[in-house]
Amino acid sequence: MQKMNHDSYPNAYILDILKSVQVIAMVGASAKWNRPSYFAMKYLQEKGYRVIPVNPGQAGKEILGERAYASLAEIPVPFQMVDIFRASEAAGGIVDEAIALKDEKQIQVVWMQLGVRDDAAAERAEAAGLKVVMNRCPKIEFGRLNAELAWGGFDTRVITARRRQVRLT
Amino acid sequence: MSKERTYGFETRMIHAGAQPEPLTGARQTPIFQNTSYAFHDADHAASLFNLQTFGFIYSRLTNPTVAVLEERLASLESGRGSTCTASGHAAQLLTFFAFMEPGDHFIASTRLYGGSITQFGKTFRKFDWNVTFVDVDEPEAVRRALTPRTKAIFVESLANPGGVISDMEALAAVGREAGIPLIVDNTLASPWLCRPIEWGADLVLHSTTKFLSGNGTAMGGAVIDSGRFDWTAAGERFRGLSEPEPAYHGLAFHETFGDLAFTTHAHAVGLRDLGATMAPLHAFLTLLGTETLALRMQRHCENAMKVARFLAAHEEVAWVSYAGLPESPYHALAQKYLPRGAGSVFTFGLKGGYAAGVRLVEKVNLFSHLANVGDSRSLILHPASTTHRQLSAEQREAAGAGDDVVRLSIGLETAEDLIDDLQMALERTAVALRQGAS
Protein backbone atom coordinates (compact mmCIF):
# COMPACT_ATOMS: atom_id res chain seq x y z
CA MET A 1 0.00 0.00 0.00
CA GLN A 2 1.17 3.50 -0.84
CA LYS A 3 2.27 5.50 2.21
CA MET A 4 -0.47 7.85 3.39
CA ASN A 5 0.04 11.55 4.04
CA HIS A 6 -1.96 12.12 7.21
CA ASP A 7 -2.10 15.90 6.69
CA SER A 8 -3.84 15.71 3.30
CA TYR A 9 -5.86 12.62 2.37
CA PRO A 10 -6.85 12.12 -1.28
CA ASN A 11 -10.64 12.29 -1.67
CA ALA A 12 -10.65 8.80 -3.22
CA TYR A 13 -9.06 7.30 -0.07
CA ILE A 14 -11.78 8.71 2.22
CA LEU A 15 -14.59 7.89 -0.25
CA ASP A 16 -13.36 4.32 -0.53
CA ILE A 17 -13.52 3.94 3.27
CA LEU A 18 -16.98 5.51 3.53
CA LYS A 19 -18.28 3.23 0.73
CA SER A 20 -16.79 0.00 2.10
CA VAL A 21 -17.88 0.36 5.74
CA GLN A 22 -21.34 -0.66 7.02
CA VAL A 23 -20.95 -0.96 10.80
CA ILE A 24 -19.02 1.59 12.93
CA ALA A 25 -18.03 1.19 16.58
CA MET A 26 -18.00 4.72 18.05
CA VAL A 27 -15.74 4.90 21.09
CA GLY A 28 -16.75 7.79 23.33
CA ALA A 29 -20.30 8.10 21.98
CA SER A 30 -22.31 10.37 24.28
CA ALA A 31 -25.95 9.97 25.35
CA LYS A 32 -26.35 13.77 25.55
CA TRP A 33 -28.16 15.13 22.51
CA ASN A 34 -26.07 18.29 22.16
CA ARG A 35 -22.63 16.59 22.22
CA PRO A 36 -20.59 16.41 18.99
CA SER A 37 -20.49 12.58 19.08
CA TYR A 38 -24.29 12.42 19.28
CA PHE A 39 -24.51 14.72 16.22
CA ALA A 40 -22.11 12.50 14.29
CA MET A 41 -23.83 9.25 15.32
CA LYS A 42 -27.29 10.51 14.36
CA TYR A 43 -26.05 11.77 10.99
CA LEU A 44 -24.22 8.53 10.15
CA GLN A 45 -27.33 6.53 11.07
CA GLU A 46 -29.40 8.70 8.71
CA LYS A 47 -26.91 7.89 5.94
CA GLY A 48 -27.46 4.14 6.41
CA TYR A 49 -24.57 3.18 8.72
CA ARG A 50 -25.13 1.10 11.82
CA VAL A 51 -23.29 2.86 14.67
CA ILE A 52 -22.61 0.92 17.87
CA PRO A 53 -21.73 3.12 20.88
CA VAL A 54 -18.78 2.17 23.10
CA ASN A 55 -18.95 3.99 26.45
CA PRO A 56 -18.42 2.24 29.84
CA GLY A 57 -20.68 4.76 31.57
CA GLN A 58 -23.56 3.89 29.25
CA ALA A 59 -22.96 0.12 28.94
CA GLY A 60 -26.24 -1.78 28.75
CA LYS A 61 -28.24 1.40 28.02
CA GLU A 62 -29.37 2.58 24.58
CA ILE A 63 -28.14 5.59 22.61
CA LEU A 64 -30.18 6.49 19.51
CA GLY A 65 -31.75 3.01 19.52
CA GLU A 66 -28.42 1.13 19.77
CA ARG A 67 -27.19 -0.72 22.87
CA ALA A 68 -23.92 0.66 24.24
CA TYR A 69 -20.98 -1.56 25.20
CA ALA A 70 -18.13 -1.00 27.67
CA SER A 71 -15.38 -2.00 25.20
CA LEU A 72 -14.75 -3.01 21.59
CA ALA A 73 -14.23 -6.64 22.67
CA GLU A 74 -17.77 -6.85 24.06
CA ILE A 75 -19.50 -5.90 20.80
CA PRO A 76 -21.11 -9.17 19.65
CA VAL A 77 -21.26 -8.41 15.91
CA PRO A 78 -18.59 -7.63 13.28
CA PHE A 79 -17.76 -3.97 12.63
CA GLN A 80 -15.48 -2.62 9.90
CA MET A 81 -14.50 0.71 11.46
CA VAL A 82 -13.54 2.07 14.88
CA ASP A 83 -14.32 5.81 15.25
CA ILE A 84 -12.40 7.29 18.19
CA PHE A 85 -14.15 10.19 19.95
CA ARG A 86 -11.58 10.42 22.76
CA ALA A 87 -8.59 12.65 23.53
CA SER A 88 -5.36 11.93 21.60
CA GLU A 89 -3.74 10.48 24.76
CA ALA A 90 -6.42 7.79 24.92
CA ALA A 91 -6.27 6.95 21.21
CA GLY A 92 -3.18 4.68 21.29
CA GLY A 93 -4.75 2.16 23.66
CA ILE A 94 -7.93 1.97 21.60
CA VAL A 95 -5.92 1.51 18.41
CA ASP A 96 -3.99 -1.40 19.99
CA GLU A 97 -7.29 -2.96 21.05
CA ALA A 98 -8.54 -2.65 17.47
CA ILE A 99 -5.35 -4.26 16.13
CA ALA A 100 -5.79 -7.20 18.55
CA LEU A 101 -9.47 -7.63 17.53
CA LYS A 102 -8.91 -7.02 13.82
CA ASP A 103 -9.56 -10.55 12.57
CA GLU A 104 -12.23 -11.52 15.11
CA LYS A 105 -14.35 -8.38 14.44
CA GLN A 106 -13.37 -7.90 10.76
CA ILE A 107 -12.01 -4.41 11.47
CA GLN A 108 -10.56 -2.62 8.40
CA VAL A 109 -10.35 1.05 9.41
CA VAL A 110 -9.29 3.06 12.46
CA TRP A 111 -10.62 6.62 12.35
CA MET A 112 -9.61 9.30 14.86
CA GLN A 113 -11.91 12.29 15.20
CA LEU A 114 -11.17 15.98 14.55
CA GLY A 115 -8.43 17.05 16.95
CA VAL A 116 -7.39 13.45 17.67
CA ARG A 117 -4.02 12.33 16.35
CA ASP A 118 -1.42 9.73 17.34
CA ASP A 119 1.12 9.12 14.60
CA ALA A 120 2.83 6.23 16.40
CA ALA A 121 -0.50 4.43 16.86
CA ALA A 122 -1.31 5.10 13.19
CA GLU A 123 1.95 3.44 12.15
CA ARG A 124 1.17 0.36 14.26
CA ALA A 125 -2.32 0.13 12.73
CA GLU A 126 -1.01 0.54 9.17
CA ALA A 127 1.65 -2.11 9.82
CA ALA A 128 -1.19 -4.45 10.89
CA GLY A 129 -2.95 -3.78 7.56
CA LEU A 130 -5.58 -1.33 8.82
CA LYS A 131 -6.43 1.90 7.02
CA VAL A 132 -6.05 4.99 9.19
CA VAL A 133 -7.69 8.44 9.16
CA MET A 134 -6.75 11.04 11.77
CA ASN A 135 -7.99 14.50 12.73
CA ARG A 136 -11.14 14.23 10.59
CA CYS A 137 -14.84 13.68 11.28
CA PRO A 138 -16.67 10.99 9.25
CA LYS A 139 -19.84 13.11 9.33
CA ILE A 140 -18.04 16.13 7.87
CA GLU A 141 -16.18 13.95 5.35
CA PHE A 142 -19.38 12.20 4.23
CA GLY A 143 -21.09 15.59 3.89
CA ARG A 144 -18.07 17.11 2.16
CA LEU A 145 -17.73 14.37 -0.47
CA ASN A 146 -21.48 14.26 -1.13
CA ALA A 147 -21.83 18.06 -1.55
CA GLU A 148 -23.98 18.40 1.60
CA LEU A 149 -21.30 20.28 3.52
CA ALA A 150 -21.37 22.95 0.80
CA TRP A 151 -24.99 23.71 1.70
CA GLY A 152 -23.71 25.39 4.85
CA GLY A 153 -21.29 27.62 2.93
CA PHE A 154 -18.14 25.50 3.41
CA ASP A 155 -15.32 24.78 1.00
CA THR A 156 -15.53 21.05 0.20
CA ARG A 157 -12.40 21.22 -2.03
CA VAL A 158 -14.26 18.91 -4.42
CA ILE A 159 -13.81 20.11 -8.01
CA THR A 160 -15.61 18.13 -10.69
CA ALA A 161 -17.62 18.69 -13.88
CA ARG A 162 -19.15 15.22 -13.64
CA ARG A 163 -22.86 14.83 -13.01
CA ARG A 164 -23.55 13.17 -9.67
CA GLN A 165 -25.56 9.94 -9.85
CA VAL A 166 -28.92 10.21 -8.11
CA ARG A 167 -30.53 6.84 -7.36
CA LEU A 168 -34.27 6.97 -7.99
CA THR A 169 -36.64 4.37 -6.55
CA MET B 1 3.07 10.01 -0.99
CA SER B 2 -0.69 10.05 -1.59
CA LYS B 3 -2.24 13.44 -0.96
CA GLU B 4 -5.19 15.59 -1.96
CA ARG B 5 -4.99 17.33 -5.35
CA THR B 6 -5.14 21.12 -5.17
CA TYR B 7 -6.50 23.10 -8.12
CA GLY B 8 -5.36 26.51 -9.37
CA PHE B 9 -7.16 29.80 -8.70
CA GLU B 10 -8.54 30.12 -12.24
CA THR B 11 -9.95 26.58 -12.13
CA ARG B 12 -11.59 27.24 -8.77
CA MET B 13 -13.07 30.62 -9.79
CA ILE B 14 -15.12 28.70 -12.38
CA HIS B 15 -15.68 25.31 -10.69
CA ALA B 16 -15.53 25.72 -6.89
CA GLY B 17 -18.98 25.07 -5.43
CA ALA B 18 -20.64 24.43 -8.77
CA GLN B 19 -21.17 20.88 -9.96
CA PRO B 20 -23.80 19.97 -12.58
CA GLU B 21 -27.23 19.96 -10.91
CA PRO B 22 -27.70 16.22 -10.24
CA LEU B 23 -31.38 15.76 -11.08
CA THR B 24 -31.42 17.64 -14.42
CA GLY B 25 -27.76 17.91 -15.40
CA ALA B 26 -28.08 21.71 -15.69
CA ARG B 27 -24.47 22.89 -15.98
CA GLN B 28 -24.77 26.55 -15.00
CA THR B 29 -25.84 27.07 -11.38
CA PRO B 30 -29.66 27.30 -11.24
CA ILE B 31 -31.31 30.27 -9.52
CA PHE B 32 -33.22 28.64 -6.67
CA GLN B 33 -35.80 31.42 -6.44
CA ASN B 34 -37.37 29.71 -3.48
CA THR B 35 -38.12 30.37 0.17
CA SER B 36 -38.52 26.97 1.86
CA TYR B 37 -37.59 23.30 1.58
CA ALA B 38 -39.61 20.12 2.14
CA PHE B 39 -38.54 17.80 4.97
CA HIS B 40 -38.31 14.03 4.44
CA ASP B 41 -40.17 13.37 7.72
CA ALA B 42 -40.55 14.73 11.27
CA ASP B 43 -37.20 13.32 12.40
CA HIS B 44 -35.38 14.94 9.45
CA ALA B 45 -37.01 18.27 10.34
CA ALA B 46 -35.90 17.87 13.97
CA SER B 47 -32.31 17.08 12.88
CA LEU B 48 -32.24 20.17 10.68
CA PHE B 49 -33.58 22.49 13.39
CA ASN B 50 -31.09 21.00 15.91
CA LEU B 51 -28.23 21.62 13.38
CA GLN B 52 -27.46 17.87 13.49
CA THR B 53 -27.59 17.40 9.75
CA PHE B 54 -26.78 19.48 6.65
CA GLY B 55 -29.70 20.82 4.66
CA PHE B 56 -32.03 23.67 3.87
CA ILE B 57 -34.92 24.95 6.00
CA TYR B 58 -35.66 28.49 4.93
CA SER B 59 -33.83 30.85 2.56
CA ARG B 60 -33.28 33.49 5.26
CA LEU B 61 -30.66 31.09 6.65
CA THR B 62 -29.38 29.22 3.59
CA ASN B 63 -30.26 28.88 -0.10
CA PRO B 64 -28.74 26.50 -2.69
CA THR B 65 -27.69 29.25 -5.15
CA VAL B 66 -26.24 31.42 -2.39
CA ALA B 67 -24.42 28.35 -1.00
CA VAL B 68 -22.59 27.87 -4.32
CA LEU B 69 -21.26 31.43 -4.10
CA GLU B 70 -20.34 30.91 -0.44
CA GLU B 71 -18.27 27.84 -1.23
CA ARG B 72 -16.61 29.60 -4.18
CA LEU B 73 -15.61 32.62 -2.10
CA ALA B 74 -14.34 30.39 0.73
CA SER B 75 -12.22 28.54 -1.82
CA LEU B 76 -10.85 31.67 -3.54
CA GLU B 77 -9.97 33.31 -0.20
CA SER B 78 -8.32 30.13 1.20
CA GLY B 79 -10.96 30.05 3.94
CA ARG B 80 -12.94 27.26 5.60
CA GLY B 81 -16.41 28.65 4.97
CA SER B 82 -18.25 31.82 4.10
CA THR B 83 -21.55 33.55 4.68
CA CYS B 84 -23.10 35.81 2.06
CA THR B 85 -25.23 38.79 3.01
CA ALA B 86 -27.43 41.44 1.40
CA SER B 87 -24.56 43.96 1.23
CA GLY B 88 -21.04 44.57 2.45
CA HIS B 89 -22.41 46.61 5.35
CA ALA B 90 -24.62 43.66 6.33
CA ALA B 91 -21.51 41.43 6.34
CA GLN B 92 -19.83 43.85 8.75
CA LEU B 93 -22.86 43.90 11.07
CA LEU B 94 -23.14 40.10 10.95
CA THR B 95 -19.43 39.67 11.73
CA PHE B 96 -19.31 41.94 14.77
CA PHE B 97 -22.69 40.62 15.99
CA ALA B 98 -21.10 37.16 16.39
CA PHE B 99 -18.84 38.25 19.26
CA MET B 100 -19.50 41.86 20.35
CA GLU B 101 -21.42 42.61 23.56
CA PRO B 102 -22.60 46.01 24.81
CA GLY B 103 -19.58 47.83 26.23
CA ASP B 104 -17.10 46.00 23.97
CA HIS B 105 -14.50 47.73 21.86
CA PHE B 106 -12.62 47.24 18.59
CA ILE B 107 -9.85 49.00 16.69
CA ALA B 108 -10.29 50.10 13.08
CA SER B 109 -8.08 51.87 10.57
CA THR B 110 -8.60 55.60 10.08
CA ARG B 111 -8.40 54.98 6.33
CA LEU B 112 -11.54 52.95 5.77
CA TYR B 113 -14.24 53.43 3.19
CA GLY B 114 -16.33 56.38 4.50
CA GLY B 115 -19.46 54.23 4.78
CA SER B 116 -17.62 51.87 7.15
CA ILE B 117 -16.42 54.77 9.30
CA THR B 118 -20.01 55.99 9.64
CA GLN B 119 -21.38 52.50 10.38
CA PHE B 120 -18.71 51.81 13.02
CA GLY B 121 -18.51 55.28 14.53
CA LYS B 122 -22.20 56.20 14.58
CA THR B 123 -24.59 53.27 14.15
CA PHE B 124 -22.57 50.66 16.06
CA ARG B 125 -22.48 53.03 19.06
CA LYS B 126 -26.26 52.51 19.40
CA PHE B 127 -25.41 48.90 20.38
CA ASP B 128 -22.69 50.23 22.72
CA TRP B 129 -20.06 48.73 20.42
CA ASN B 130 -17.19 51.20 20.63
CA VAL B 131 -14.54 51.80 18.01
CA THR B 132 -11.18 53.57 18.17
CA PHE B 133 -9.86 54.65 14.77
CA VAL B 134 -6.08 54.28 14.61
CA ASP B 135 -3.41 54.94 11.97
CA VAL B 136 -2.60 51.28 11.36
CA ASP B 137 0.67 52.14 9.57
CA GLU B 138 2.04 52.06 13.13
CA PRO B 139 1.43 48.65 14.74
CA GLU B 140 2.60 50.25 18.02
CA ALA B 141 -0.33 52.68 17.88
CA VAL B 142 -2.66 49.69 17.51
CA ARG B 143 -1.06 48.06 20.57
CA ARG B 144 -1.53 51.25 22.58
CA ALA B 145 -5.23 51.38 21.68
CA LEU B 146 -5.93 47.87 23.05
CA THR B 147 -8.24 47.69 26.07
CA PRO B 148 -9.44 44.66 28.10
CA ARG B 149 -12.72 44.90 26.13
CA THR B 150 -11.06 45.06 22.68
CA LYS B 151 -12.43 42.20 20.53
CA ALA B 152 -10.97 42.77 17.06
CA ILE B 153 -8.70 44.74 14.73
CA PHE B 154 -10.33 45.82 11.45
CA VAL B 155 -8.47 47.06 8.36
CA GLU B 156 -8.76 47.09 4.58
CA SER B 157 -6.07 45.20 2.65
CA LEU B 158 -6.14 47.94 -0.01
CA ALA B 159 -7.89 50.98 1.39
CA ASN B 160 -10.73 52.84 -0.26
CA PRO B 161 -10.12 55.51 -1.39
CA GLY B 162 -6.51 56.20 -0.47
CA GLY B 163 -4.33 53.70 -2.39
CA VAL B 164 -3.07 52.64 1.04
CA ILE B 165 -1.99 49.08 1.92
CA SER B 166 -2.20 47.59 5.41
CA ASP B 167 0.76 45.58 6.73
CA MET B 168 -1.39 42.55 7.47
CA GLU B 169 1.39 40.29 8.71
CA ALA B 170 2.41 42.82 11.39
CA LEU B 171 -1.21 43.50 12.38
CA ALA B 172 -2.01 39.78 12.60
CA ALA B 173 0.90 39.46 15.04
CA VAL B 174 -0.59 42.24 17.21
CA GLY B 175 -3.93 40.41 17.15
CA ARG B 176 -2.37 37.08 18.07
CA GLU B 177 -0.52 38.62 21.05
CA ALA B 178 -3.78 40.17 22.26
CA GLY B 179 -5.85 37.03 21.58
CA ILE B 180 -8.21 38.85 19.19
CA PRO B 181 -8.98 38.28 15.50
CA LEU B 182 -7.67 40.39 12.62
CA ILE B 183 -10.53 41.20 10.24
CA VAL B 184 -9.61 42.37 6.74
CA ASP B 185 -11.92 43.98 4.21
CA ASN B 186 -10.52 42.66 0.92
CA THR B 187 -13.08 44.31 -1.38
CA LEU B 188 -10.73 46.50 -3.41
CA ALA B 189 -8.02 43.89 -3.88
CA SER B 190 -10.19 40.83 -4.60
CA PRO B 191 -8.74 37.39 -3.82
CA TRP B 192 -6.92 37.29 -7.15
CA LEU B 193 -4.66 40.16 -6.05
CA CYS B 194 -4.44 39.39 -2.33
CA ARG B 195 -5.56 36.66 0.08
CA PRO B 196 -5.40 38.08 3.62
CA ILE B 197 -5.95 34.68 5.30
CA GLU B 198 -2.58 33.59 3.85
CA TRP B 199 -1.03 36.57 5.70
CA GLY B 200 -2.64 35.74 9.06
CA ALA B 201 -6.10 37.33 8.89
CA ASP B 202 -8.81 35.41 10.76
CA LEU B 203 -11.86 36.78 8.94
CA VAL B 204 -12.12 38.40 5.49
CA LEU B 205 -14.97 40.65 4.41
CA HIS B 206 -16.22 41.66 1.00
CA SER B 207 -18.66 43.93 -0.62
CA THR B 208 -19.33 41.46 -3.46
CA THR B 209 -21.07 44.38 -5.19
CA LYS B 210 -17.64 45.48 -6.44
CA PHE B 211 -15.04 43.42 -8.34
CA LEU B 212 -16.47 40.00 -7.49
CA SER B 213 -19.73 40.66 -9.33
CA GLY B 214 -17.88 43.11 -11.55
CA ASN B 215 -20.68 44.54 -13.64
CA GLY B 216 -22.46 46.87 -11.23
CA THR B 217 -25.54 44.63 -11.20
CA ALA B 218 -25.96 43.03 -7.78
CA MET B 219 -25.63 44.19 -4.18
CA GLY B 220 -24.01 41.69 -1.85
CA GLY B 221 -21.53 41.03 0.92
CA ALA B 222 -19.63 38.11 2.38
CA VAL B 223 -17.64 37.14 5.45
CA ILE B 224 -15.09 34.37 4.93
CA ASP B 225 -13.80 32.52 7.99
CA SER B 226 -10.30 31.07 8.08
CA GLY B 227 -11.47 28.49 10.64
CA ARG B 228 -8.27 29.15 12.60
CA PHE B 229 -9.26 31.51 15.41
CA ASP B 230 -9.67 29.79 18.80
CA TRP B 231 -12.90 31.33 20.12
CA THR B 232 -12.73 29.22 23.28
CA ALA B 233 -9.13 29.96 24.35
CA ALA B 234 -10.01 33.26 26.05
CA GLY B 235 -12.73 31.81 28.32
CA GLU B 236 -15.92 33.84 28.03
CA ARG B 237 -14.40 36.63 25.95
CA PHE B 238 -16.09 35.47 22.72
CA ARG B 239 -19.04 33.90 24.47
CA GLY B 240 -21.39 34.10 21.48
CA LEU B 241 -19.25 31.33 19.96
CA SER B 242 -17.79 29.61 23.03
CA GLU B 243 -20.68 29.50 25.51
CA PRO B 244 -23.92 27.45 25.36
CA GLU B 245 -26.49 29.10 23.07
CA PRO B 246 -29.95 29.13 24.73
CA ALA B 247 -31.83 29.26 21.41
CA TYR B 248 -30.20 25.93 20.44
CA HIS B 249 -30.80 24.16 23.78
CA GLY B 250 -27.39 24.91 25.20
CA LEU B 251 -25.23 24.00 22.20
CA ALA B 252 -21.77 25.63 22.28
CA PHE B 253 -20.89 26.46 18.66
CA HIS B 254 -17.10 26.31 18.83
CA GLU B 255 -17.03 23.05 20.80
CA THR B 256 -19.58 21.31 18.57
CA PHE B 257 -18.58 22.64 15.15
CA GLY B 258 -14.85 23.26 15.56
CA ASP B 259 -13.46 25.12 12.55
CA LEU B 260 -16.99 25.30 11.09
CA ALA B 261 -18.26 27.25 14.13
CA PHE B 262 -18.13 30.85 12.88
CA THR B 263 -19.82 30.13 9.54
CA THR B 264 -22.45 27.89 11.16
CA HIS B 265 -23.18 30.58 13.75
CA ALA B 266 -23.32 33.31 11.09
CA HIS B 267 -26.09 31.42 9.29
CA ALA B 268 -27.95 29.77 12.16
CA VAL B 269 -27.92 32.76 14.52
CA GLY B 270 -26.71 35.82 12.56
CA LEU B 271 -28.79 35.54 9.40
CA ARG B 272 -31.66 33.94 11.32
CA ASP B 273 -32.03 36.96 13.59
CA LEU B 274 -30.59 39.88 11.63
CA GLY B 275 -32.21 38.74 8.38
CA ALA B 276 -29.76 40.47 6.02
CA THR B 277 -29.77 37.60 3.52
CA MET B 278 -28.36 37.71 -0.02
CA ALA B 279 -30.99 37.19 -2.72
CA PRO B 280 -30.54 34.07 -4.94
CA LEU B 281 -30.53 36.20 -8.12
CA HIS B 282 -27.74 38.34 -6.69
CA ALA B 283 -25.75 35.22 -5.84
CA PHE B 284 -26.21 34.04 -9.44
CA LEU B 285 -25.05 37.36 -10.93
CA THR B 286 -22.07 37.39 -8.59
CA LEU B 287 -21.18 33.82 -9.57
CA LEU B 288 -21.08 34.92 -13.22
CA GLY B 289 -18.69 37.67 -12.19
CA THR B 290 -16.33 35.37 -10.30
CA GLU B 291 -15.91 33.17 -13.40
CA THR B 292 -13.87 35.93 -15.08
CA LEU B 293 -12.31 37.52 -11.98
CA ALA B 294 -8.66 36.87 -12.82
CA LEU B 295 -8.99 38.13 -16.40
CA ARG B 296 -10.79 41.27 -15.33
CA MET B 297 -8.47 42.10 -12.43
CA GLN B 298 -5.45 41.79 -14.71
CA ARG B 299 -6.93 44.33 -17.16
CA HIS B 300 -8.21 46.59 -14.37
CA CYS B 301 -4.67 46.80 -12.99
CA GLU B 302 -3.01 47.37 -16.41
CA ASN B 303 -5.42 50.19 -17.22
CA ALA B 304 -5.10 51.73 -13.75
CA MET B 305 -1.32 51.83 -14.06
CA LYS B 306 -1.51 53.61 -17.46
CA VAL B 307 -4.00 56.19 -16.16
CA ALA B 308 -2.02 56.73 -12.93
CA ARG B 309 1.18 57.37 -14.92
CA PHE B 310 -0.64 59.85 -17.15
CA LEU B 311 -2.07 61.74 -14.16
CA ALA B 312 1.24 61.77 -12.26
CA ALA B 313 2.76 63.70 -15.20
CA HIS B 314 -0.15 66.14 -15.62
CA GLU B 315 0.35 69.80 -14.72
CA GLU B 316 -3.11 70.24 -13.12
CA VAL B 317 -2.54 67.24 -10.83
CA ALA B 318 -0.86 67.82 -7.45
CA TRP B 319 -0.32 64.17 -6.53
CA VAL B 320 -1.41 60.61 -7.34
CA SER B 321 -1.91 58.02 -4.60
CA TYR B 322 -1.58 54.69 -6.38
CA ALA B 323 0.46 51.98 -4.71
CA GLY B 324 1.44 50.63 -8.13
CA LEU B 325 3.61 53.70 -8.80
CA PRO B 326 7.23 53.35 -7.59
CA GLU B 327 7.06 56.77 -5.89
CA SER B 328 4.14 55.68 -3.66
CA PRO B 329 5.08 55.25 0.02
CA TYR B 330 3.08 52.00 -0.12
CA HIS B 331 4.92 50.59 -3.16
CA ALA B 332 7.01 48.17 -1.07
CA LEU B 333 3.90 46.85 0.71
CA ALA B 334 2.17 46.55 -2.67
CA GLN B 335 5.00 44.40 -3.99
CA LYS B 336 4.72 42.18 -0.91
CA TYR B 337 0.94 41.84 -0.59
CA LEU B 338 -0.34 42.59 -4.13
CA PRO B 339 2.45 41.57 -6.50
CA ARG B 340 0.05 41.11 -9.43
CA GLY B 341 -1.14 44.70 -9.30
CA ALA B 342 -2.30 47.40 -6.92
CA GLY B 343 -5.94 47.28 -7.97
CA SER B 344 -7.79 49.87 -10.00
CA VAL B 345 -9.25 52.23 -7.40
CA PHE B 346 -7.06 55.17 -6.47
CA THR B 347 -7.11 58.87 -5.74
CA PHE B 348 -5.39 61.94 -7.05
CA GLY B 349 -5.28 65.57 -5.94
CA LEU B 350 -6.24 68.54 -8.06
CA LYS B 351 -4.21 71.72 -7.76
CA GLY B 352 -7.53 73.55 -8.08
CA GLY B 353 -8.88 72.00 -4.83
CA TYR B 354 -12.57 71.52 -3.99
CA ALA B 355 -13.79 73.79 -6.82
CA ALA B 356 -11.81 71.83 -9.39
CA GLY B 357 -13.04 68.49 -7.99
CA VAL B 358 -16.74 69.27 -8.31
CA ARG B 359 -16.19 70.60 -11.84
CA LEU B 360 -14.02 67.74 -13.10
CA VAL B 361 -16.69 65.11 -12.35
CA GLU B 362 -19.09 67.07 -14.56
CA LYS B 363 -16.66 67.54 -17.48
CA VAL B 364 -15.78 63.88 -18.13
CA ASN B 365 -17.67 62.06 -20.85
CA LEU B 366 -16.59 58.43 -20.55
CA PHE B 367 -16.20 58.17 -16.78
CA SER B 368 -19.51 57.65 -14.96
CA HIS B 369 -20.08 60.06 -12.07
CA LEU B 370 -21.46 57.80 -9.36
CA ALA B 371 -20.82 56.30 -5.93
CA ASN B 372 -19.50 52.81 -6.63
CA VAL B 373 -16.21 51.10 -7.39
CA GLY B 374 -15.15 47.85 -9.05
CA ASP B 375 -17.36 48.11 -12.13
CA SER B 376 -16.40 47.14 -15.69
CA ARG B 377 -17.06 50.82 -16.46
CA SER B 378 -14.67 53.55 -15.31
CA LEU B 379 -16.09 55.61 -12.48
CA ILE B 380 -15.24 59.00 -11.01
CA LEU B 381 -16.20 60.60 -7.71
CA HIS B 382 -15.34 63.62 -5.60
CA PRO B 383 -15.53 62.03 -2.10
CA ALA B 384 -15.55 65.28 -0.10
CA SER B 385 -18.84 66.31 -1.69
CA THR B 386 -20.42 62.81 -1.78
CA THR B 387 -19.44 59.54 0.04
CA HIS B 388 -17.40 61.26 2.76
CA ARG B 389 -19.57 64.36 3.24
CA GLN B 390 -21.03 62.99 6.52
CA LEU B 391 -17.51 63.09 8.02
CA SER B 392 -15.85 66.09 9.65
CA ALA B 393 -13.11 67.88 7.70
CA GLU B 394 -10.59 66.26 10.05
CA GLN B 395 -11.99 62.77 9.49
CA ARG B 396 -12.07 63.36 5.72
CA GLU B 397 -8.41 64.33 5.74
CA ALA B 398 -7.50 61.28 7.85
CA ALA B 399 -9.49 59.02 5.52
CA GLY B 400 -7.61 60.35 2.49
CA ALA B 401 -10.71 62.16 1.23
CA GLY B 402 -9.70 65.80 1.55
CA ASP B 403 -11.23 68.65 -0.49
CA ASP B 404 -8.88 68.28 -3.50
CA VAL B 405 -9.23 64.51 -3.78
CA VAL B 406 -10.80 62.77 -6.78
CA ARG B 407 -11.38 59.01 -6.71
CA LEU B 408 -11.21 56.88 -9.83
CA SER B 409 -12.25 53.28 -10.34
CA ILE B 410 -10.62 52.31 -13.60
CA GLY B 411 -12.67 49.97 -15.77
CA LEU B 412 -11.99 47.69 -18.69
CA GLU B 413 -12.29 50.20 -21.55
CA THR B 414 -9.46 51.06 -23.97
CA ALA B 415 -6.86 52.78 -21.78
CA GLU B 416 -6.11 55.51 -24.37
CA ASP B 417 -9.79 56.51 -24.42
CA LEU B 418 -9.79 56.90 -20.64
CA ILE B 419 -6.63 59.02 -20.73
CA ASP B 420 -8.02 61.26 -23.53
CA ASP B 421 -11.25 61.72 -21.58
CA LEU B 422 -9.40 62.83 -18.45
CA GLN B 423 -7.10 65.08 -20.51
CA MET B 424 -10.14 66.80 -22.03
CA ALA B 425 -11.91 67.16 -18.67
CA LEU B 426 -8.80 68.50 -16.89
CA GLU B 427 -8.32 71.13 -19.61
CA ARG B 428 -11.95 72.23 -19.45
CA THR B 429 -11.87 72.32 -15.65
CA ALA B 430 -8.82 74.58 -15.74
CA VAL B 431 -10.54 76.87 -18.25
CA ALA B 432 -13.72 76.99 -16.14
CA LEU B 433 -11.76 77.83 -13.00
CA ARG B 434 -9.87 80.63 -14.78
CA GLN B 435 -13.13 82.04 -16.12
CA GLY B 436 -14.72 81.77 -12.67
CA ALA B 437 -11.77 83.60 -11.13
CA SER B 438 -11.77 86.46 -13.64
Image (spheres, rainbow, N blue to C red):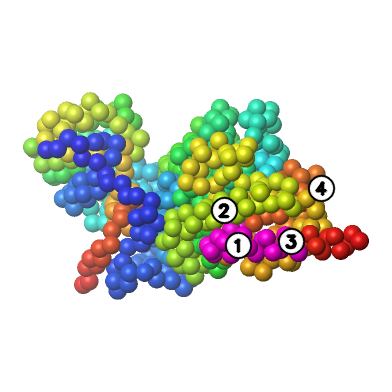
Which of the numbered marks, if any, corresponds to residue B393? 4
A98 above or below A146? above
Query: Are labels 4 and 3 assigned to the same chain?
Result: yes
First in sequence: mark 1 or mark 4? 4
Which of the numbered marks, if any, corresponds to residue B418? 1
Which of label 2 and label 4 is nearer to you? 2
Which of label 1 and label 3 is nearer to you? 3
Query: Are labels 2 and 4 assigned to the same chain?
Result: yes
Q: Amino acid at mark 1?
A: Leu
First in sequence: mark 1 or mark 3? 1
Tell me residue B399's x, y (percent). Answer: 71, 45
**For the residue carrying disc 1, how many other residues have a C-alpha within 10 Å: few (<14), some (14-19), or many (20+)?**
many
> Alpha carbon of mark 1 to alpha carbon of mark 4: how far?
31 Å
| Residue beneath disc 2 | B306
A115 above or below B185? above
First in sequence: mark 2 or mark 1? 2
Q: What is the span of residues highlighted in magenta in the rendered image?
A: B409-428
Which of the numbered marks, if any, corresponds to residue B427? 3
B276 above or below B81? below
Asked if labels 3 and 4 touch by Cβ distance under 8 angstroms, the answer is no
Question: Residue B411 magenta-drawn?
Answer: yes
